[in-house]
Image (cartoon, rainbow, N blue to C red):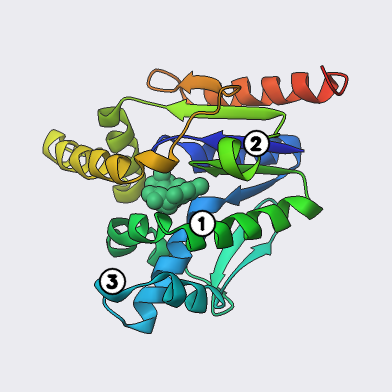
């Protein structure tokens, strides 16, 4: 079973996917964490981003792996988790450069499909319901107002209430990344659109879990 959760930057895909996976006893696969880990591996290697090529990306990809844990797959670089590094500002500002390269996308998609071959998964990303798992029985497309997305991301990062100026600056960064990622951020025709601007996280998780339970009780083929 695959549940695909797609949507723009900071729309709450990863935290929602993680929670849904825990509710259902599935594993969460965060495809963005692979693009981020690949970007961090390239930065560690030291060549400047303007010299990154499909070949150098595939060479560095050998250092990145997905390891299953209890409720989620973790992206590893050189065998170790690097969460802080891959969520940092530098990786975030460069990751779209890697994500636009078809060879990098094929490499990520292969890792995600491998994970799904052995587990029931909730996979989040941009193109999971369109390209990676076009036959997924449940697809969700999460959207939220950019200001609200920026507010949530900053609250999570800073651990306090952000100021309006901080939210405005973060909104600009998110909207620019949305533009760079626009080609691959596609809502599948059969995806359920969920606008979370006025939903709590518990509410959005509850809706997706209810949809998943309905889908898994449906006779196959209907
Ligand atoms: O959580 P957030 O929306 O900030 O980003 P993410 O899901 O961690 O994804 C990081 C970056 O990876 C995005 O900005 C995209 O450039 C890329 N990505 C992608 O192209 N396709 C995916 N399926 C997932 C991520």
Characterize the local packing of mark 1: few (<14), some (14-19) or many (20 or more) Cα atoms within 10 angstroms: some
* Residue denoted by label 3: 49
Question: Can you tell which mark lies on residue 134?
Answer: 2
Question: Can you tell which mark lies on residue 79?
Answer: none
Q: Are marks 1 and 2 in contact (CB under 8 Å)?
A: no
Quadrant of the rendering where the C terminus is positioned: top right
Q: CA distance from mark 3 to mark 2?
A: 32 Å
- Splitting the image into 4 quarters, where does residue 221 fall? top right
Q: CA distance from mark 3 to mark 1?
A: 17 Å
The residue drawn where x is 33% and y is 33% is 149
Place of residue 52 in the rendered image (x, y in percent of width and height, measured from the top left) = 34, 73
Query: Can residue 160 be seen in the rendering of this structure?
Result: no
Characterize the local packing of mark 3: few (<14), some (14-19) or many (20 or more) Cα atoms within 10 angstroms: few
- How many marks can you see? 3
* Residue denoted by label 1: 105
Place of residue 157 in the rendered image (x, y in percent of width and height, measured from the top left) = 33, 49
Say whether mark 1 is within 8 Å of ligand 1. yes
The residue drawn where x is 35% and y is 75% is 43
Choose between 48 and 84: the one closer to the eye: 48
Say whether mark 3 is within 8 Å of ligand 1. no
Choose between 31 and 85: the one closer to the eye: 31
Position of residue 104 in the picture relative to residue 40 (left or right): right
The tag earlier along the polypeptide, 1 or 2, is 1
- Splitting the image into 4 quarters, where does residue 191 fall? top right
The tag earlier along the polypeptide, 3 or 1, is 3
């Amino acid at each position: 079973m695959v549940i695909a959760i797609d949507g723009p930057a900071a729309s709450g895909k990863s935290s929602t996917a993680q929670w849904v996976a825990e509710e259902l006893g599935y594993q969460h696969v965060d495809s963005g964490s692979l693009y981020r880990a690949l970007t961090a591996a390239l930065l560690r290697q030291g060549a400047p981003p303007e010299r990154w090529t499909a070949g150098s990306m595939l060479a560095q990809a050998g250092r990145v792996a997905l390891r299953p844990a209890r409720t989620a797959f973790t992206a590893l670089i050189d065998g170790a988790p690097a969460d802080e590094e891959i969520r940092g500002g530098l990786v975030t500002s460069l990751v779209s450069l890697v994500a636009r390269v078809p060879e990098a996308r094929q490499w990520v998609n292969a890792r995600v499909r491998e994970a799904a071959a052995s587990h029931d998964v909730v996979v989040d990303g941009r193109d999971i319901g369109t390209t990676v798992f076009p036959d997924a029985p449940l697809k969700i497309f999460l959207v939220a107002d950019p200001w609200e997305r920026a507010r949530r991301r900053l609250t999570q990062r800073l651990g306090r209430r952000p100021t309006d100026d901080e939210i405005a600056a973060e909104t600009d960064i998110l909207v620019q990344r949305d533009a760079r990622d626009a080609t691959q951020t596609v809502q599948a025709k059969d995806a359920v659109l969920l606008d979370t601007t006025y939903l709590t996280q518990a509410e959005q998780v509850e809706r997706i879990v209810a949809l998943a339970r309905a889908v898994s009780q449906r006779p196959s083929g209907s």
